[in-house]
Amino acid sequence: MAITGFRREQSRDSSPGASELDASQWAVLELADESSAVVIGAPGTGKTTTLVELVAHRLEKRGFAPEAVLVLTASR
């Protein structure tokens, strides 16, 4: 299956891939398909990385259709 609009950057300065996530980030990836979650943390703690990896994991590993994924984030 090809995923359009998703490209994982491969550079030394890019954020870590799924193999470099910590235990709390993996806990989010391992949530059941029907679960929702709120990830709270200070700036620079890996919230965005966790979100990107969660969406990639659902699309690549669990077979979700891109139109079946909804991501909401807060902003000022």
Image (tube, grey):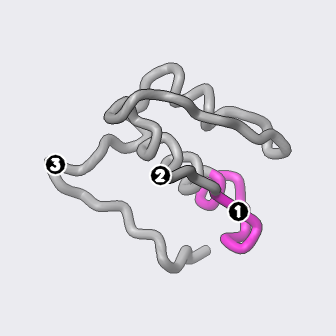
Mark 1–mark 2 Cα distance, whole angstroms, equals 23 Å
Q: Residue 5 location, x and y as percent?
A: 48, 77
Report the amino acid beneath label 2. Answer: Arg
Q: Are marks 1 and 3 in contact (CB under 8 Å)?
A: no
For disc 3, the neighbor class at 10 Å (few under 14, some 14 to 19, many from 20) is few
The residue located at (37%, 44%) in the rendering is: 17
Q: Where 59 sits versus 46, above or below?
A: below
Estimate how packed mark 2 is, as few (under 14), some (14 to 19) or many (20 or more) residues with alpha carbons within 10 Å. few
Location of the N terminus (image quadrant): bottom right
Residue 47, image x, y percentages: 46, 38
Q: Which residue is mark 1?
A: 69
Question: Residue 29, image x and y in percent?
Answer: 61, 37
In the picture of the structure, the residue carrying the numbered disc 3 is 13
Do callouts 1 and 2 mark residues in contact (Cβ within 8 Å)? no
**Amino acid type of the residue tagged 3 in the rendering:** Asp
Location of residue 31 (image quadrant): top right
Instruction: Specify start and end residues of the magenta stretch as a single range.
Output: 58-71
